[in-house]
Image (cartoon, helix red, strand yellow):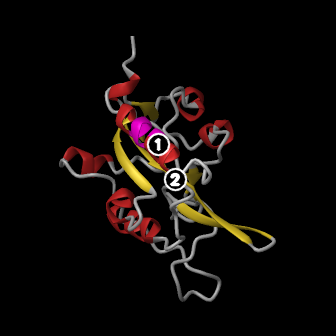
């Protein structure tokens, strides 16, 4: 039996996000990704996930109301991307809950891209030897006893990291503290 309360993960609270995009920059730096520049080539300004961006903050406007939404891999309980991968290049680690990518067996079929209902895995179209790019919850940092880069730099704690049970308890605490906000 799976013990989902013990799975580590990251969680995102849209009500606390200020749209600073520190998580996007920290992710790029922690994962050695090339900058995803704006059309003028001046600023790190990705509009969506890509072969150079593992997470992104999107702005939504409706009248005078604005909201930010973080887009990245959700490390699903039953990830469709891993189920679609015929050679198991994408796998869910039962201990950590991280859906990771191993390019060793990847043949570039991109079935994972088509299977993911959230449009997360992205192919590196501009590279000669392309790979799939997706958030892996900074598993290299977790192995070192650190937390994912996006959660480490978030100034408002909109993005938090921990065991699933702890994150659910924190979510309930936030809802109880400000029920009108949620």
Q: Is residue 86 or residue 149 the one in the foreground?
A: 149
Seen as rendered, the residue at the extreme left is 144
Q: Which element carries disc 1, helix, strand or loop? A: helix
Is 27 displayed left or right of 139 in the figure? Answer: right
The Cα–Cα distance between marks 2 and 1, rounded to whole angstroms, is 8 Å
Residue 160 image offset from top left, x and y in percent:
39, 51
Tell me where residue 178 appears, x and y as whole percent: 53, 51
In this view, the residue in front, 7 or 36, is: 7
User: Residue at (36%, 19%) from the top-left corner?
Assistant: 3
The magenta region covers: 167-172
Residue 162 placement, left or right of 46: left
Q: If you read the primary sequence from the N terminus, does the residue marked by circle 2 or circle 1 appear first?
A: 2
Residue that badge 2 annotates:
13
Contact, mark 2 vs mark 1 (Cβ under 8 Å): yes
Q: Check disc 1 and report the residue beneath it.
A: 171
Tell me if mark 2 has few (under 14), some (14-19) or many (20+) residues whose alpha carbon lies within 10 angstroms of its own.
some
Q: Is residue 167 above or below residue 49?
A: above
Residue sitting at the far right: 63
* Above or below: residue 63 compared with residue 174: below
């Amino acid at each position: 039996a799976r013990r989902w309360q013990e799975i580590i993960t990251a969680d995102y609270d849209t009500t606390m996000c200020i749209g600073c995009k520190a998580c996007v920059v920290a992710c790029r730096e922690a994962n050695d990704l090339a900058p995803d520049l704006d059309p003028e080539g001046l600023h790190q300004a990705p509009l969506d996930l890509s072969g150079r961006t593992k997470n992104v903050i999107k702005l939504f406007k409706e009248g005078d109301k604005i909201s930010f939404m973080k887009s990245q891999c959700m490390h699903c309980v039953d990830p469709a991307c891993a189920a679609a991968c015929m050679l198991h290049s994408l796998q869910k680690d039962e201990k950590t809950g991280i859906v990771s990518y191993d390019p060793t067996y990847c043949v570039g079929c991109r079935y994972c891209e088509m299977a993911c209902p959230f449009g997360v895995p992205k192919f590196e179209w501009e590279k000669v030897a392309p790979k799939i790019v997706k958030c892996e919850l900074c598993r290299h940092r977790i192995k070192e006893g650190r937390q994912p880069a996006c959660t480490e730099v978030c100034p408002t704690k909109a993005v938090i990291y921990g065991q699933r049970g702890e994150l659910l308890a924190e979510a309930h605490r936030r809802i109880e503290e400000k029920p009108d906000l949620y």
